Amino acid sequence: QLQLVESGGGLVQPGGSLRLSCAASGFTLHAYAIGWFRQAPGKEREGVSCISSSGGSTNYADSVKGRFTISRDAAKNTVFLQMNSLKPEDTAVYYCAASSGYGSSCPLHPYYYDMDYWGKGTLVTVSS
């Protein structure tokens, strides 16, 4: 079965850190650009960060620049999102998605059906 699986979410205090993982099952990620997205209760989905298939290009939402870092590990067939200095407003369900159609760029604000695969999400709660 071809799927993406997110993990690493949880409850963390403000100022804390989490590392999210996006692992592929049934296919390899090396040909895919990956995006991380989040959706808070009552809000629309927003792009958080993305990385090109080569890893040479990354992009971040202004709200997370300097705090979040995206990376990919081909050997583990996984993309990571390191989140530091977390704030209560970072609370959301975080999703990763993969697309083979972005060349040297990456999808920070794609339409849903621009992406080939979506994970089911992992919940991040930032609260004291």
Image (tube, grey):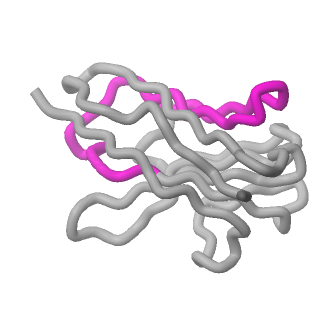
Where residue 111 sits: x, y (%)?
60, 77
Residue at 40%, 46% (x, y): give it.
122
Q: Residue furthest left?
A: 128
99 or 106, nearer to the observer: 99
Q: Quadrant of the N terminus?
A: bottom right
Residue at 73%, 68% (x, y): give it.
116
Which quadrant of the figure has residue 103?
bottom right
Residue at 44%, 31% (x, y): give it.
8
113 relative to 21 in the view: left or right: right
59 relative to 124 in the view: left or right: right
How many numbered circles does the render carry? 0
Residue 117 covered by magenta stretch: no
Residue 85 covered by magenta stretch: yes
49 relative to 62 in the view: left or right: right
Q: Residue furthest top?
A: 16
From what the image shows, is residue 1 above or below residue 70? below
70 or 25, nearer to the observer: 25
Where residue 2 sits: x, y (%)?
73, 58
16 relative to 108 in the view: left or right: left
Q: Which residues are magenta?
A: 68-94
From what the image shows, is residue 77 above or below residue 4? above
Which quadrant of the figure has residue 114?
bottom right
Where residue 86 sits: x, y (%)?
31, 30
